[in-house]
Image: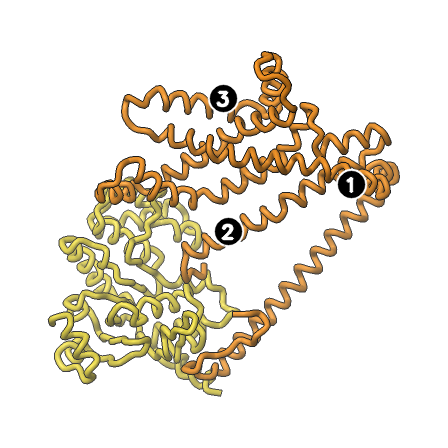
Chain colours: A yellow, B orange
Amino acid sequence: MSSEAAAGAAATRPTALSVRGVRKYFGDHAVLQGIDLDVAEHEVVVLIGASGSGKSTLLRTVNLLEPVDDGQIFLREDDITDPRADPDAVRARIGVVFQHYNLFPHLRVIDNVTLASRKVFKVSKAEAEAKGLALLERIGLADKARSYPDRLSGGQQQRVAIVRAIATDPELLLLDEITSALDPVLVGEVLDLVRDLKEGGSTILMATHEMGFARRVADRVVFLAGGRIVEAGTPEQIFNAPEHAETREFLARLHL
Amino acid sequence: MSLLTPRREPVDRPAPSAVELERRAYRRRAQIRSVVVGTASTLAFAGAVVLALRLSPGWEDVKSSFFDVSIGLDALPAILDGLWLNIRVLVVATVAVAIVGSALALARTLRGPVFAPVRLAAAAYTDIFRGMPLLIVLYLVGFGVPGLNLFGRVPAEVWGTVAITLTYSSYVAEVLRAGIEAVHPSQRLAARSLGLSHGRTMRLVVLPQAVRKVTPALMNDFVSMQKDVGLISILGAVDAIRSAQRVVTDTYNFTPYVVAGLVFVALSWPLIRVSDWLSARARAREQIGGAV
């Protein structure tokens, strides 16, 4: 059986995430038409492509926010698309940052950051807050710990959202167009933080429209169109010498 | 897609893999298992309730004075006749509540010092009628107002309708006001920036969104009103409950009350289902593609 072969292959690889033949349909519309993608540990993989190419849907299937219609997704060696897997346990191993930050407006910054540690991982409040404060310190927002999110700028909120996602040391970080809702002036501070995370050894799968950033931070760039991976390679390959006409057209439309 | 036609894979959809087929089979089994468990636990619970009733020492007496089928059937025509009055009162009261409630809600949202008296009067009205028990309002309106001898002879159900309208208008006004305030201020800004007046902004932009937000709460108030129209019986109106009461005093058997109660449940049941369905649909629309 091919699934067993795939499972065996995934078990022997040092991959953090392995996506195998994933398909997803919304009604009759095929959003993902058989995606195969590996993300090694400490690797930063950047998904690029037009709106509707399937980038966000792919990220959502990895976090089990969308059930797949076919194919498998392995986190380390665990098949997380198996209906017997506990989706909450899987999601606890993955950190997600959304386009619109999605901070909880009724909780202070520090409580946003420590919520999962305290309630999911049962870390003591003192310990969770010490770690949360240390993380906030690193992004220069320790003085905002007791503020509510609506007192923060968009860039600050997004950095808090990133800290919230990494506070539980997830095995994988999913970043879904995290700078799309930000002022151009504020994009830099968020991207600097992502670069810090990369240097700290985080495994990251991200979707972005920031080609300049993709070029600087990505170990591998994956170009999606119509729910398929058209081309994947190093940033130099994709941006300087794209092989496929579709990739060239996409990049040309961005005036790169 | 109809339930009767088999689910068809679109042409460009490749056949599902073995893994996917196994997953589907597992999900199907899990679903069947949950249906079986649910049915079994429901039956067990119902059995326990029936058993507890049967085993209680007074069951035979309760059964004969509350669940006498022949007395219930005899009382049913009179109760249904009475229910027709309840339904007419309900229809009139619903229209009246919609008008008065909206007017009160709008009065409370008026801006500017000129409207301060209107705002205050509306606030005072809702405060008083939300706080006062419906029963008291019924007594005051049903026995007090006719006592003024201003209107000649007016049937009790008319005063009942007025009392219910007074009380429920205050509830509905508050629900609508909450809905109006829940519409994001940016919507008002956008409408005013198009040159729409305050009134048009309310009517064309704010109210449609507000009503959608509070539909479940409004439905809840409606269902609640549907049963409270039964209270007009205390004014002497011959409605379903009064008709049941007449049989009760004749037979010294409470079964007609049980019948009247069931008739009210039957009356409100379709609407409860519809309102559940509406709120489920609204929820589904707001969280497109959300699996959690």
Query: Which residue shows up at 66% across the image and 59% down it?
Result: B38
Residue B30, position as x, y percentages in the image: 59, 68
Residue A58, position as x, y percentages in the image: 35, 70
Which three-letter amino acid code belongs to the residue tagged 2? Leu
Q: Secondary structure at mark 2?
A: helix
Residues tagged by mark 3 and mark 1 found on one chain of the structure: yes
Residue B202, position as x, y percentages in the image: 33, 38
Classed neighbour count for the residue bearing mark 3: other residues with Cα under 10 Å, few (<14), some (14–19), many (≥20): few
Residue B43, position as x, y percentages in the image: 73, 56
Quarter-wise, where is residue B33 in the image? bottom right
- Of mark 3 and mark 2, the one earlier in the sequence is 3
Which three-letter amino acid code belongs to the residue tagged 1? Leu
Quarter-wise, where is residue A97 in the image? bottom left
Query: Which residue shows up at 12% across the image and 79% down it?
Result: A240
Can residue B81 be seen? yes
**Residue most extreme to the front:** B152
Q: Disc 1 marks which residue?
A: B76
- Of mark 1 and mark 2, the one earlier in the sequence is 1
- Mark drawn on residue B214: none
Q: Secondary structure at mark 1?
A: helix
**Residue most extreme to the bottom:** A1
Classed neighbour count for the residue bearing mark 1: other residues with Cα under 10 Å, few (<14), some (14–19), many (≥20): many
Describe residue A206's horizontal placement relative to residue A123 as left or right. Answer: left
Chain letter behind tag 2: B
Classed neighbour count for the residue bearing mark 2: other residues with Cα under 10 Å, few (<14), some (14–19), many (≥20): some
Residues tagged by mark 1 and mark 2 found on one chain of the structure: yes
Inter-mark Cα distance, 3 to 1: 38 Å
Q: Disc 2 marks which residue?
A: B278
**Residue most extreme to the top:** B148
Query: Which residue shows up at 38% across the image and 41% down it?
Result: B207
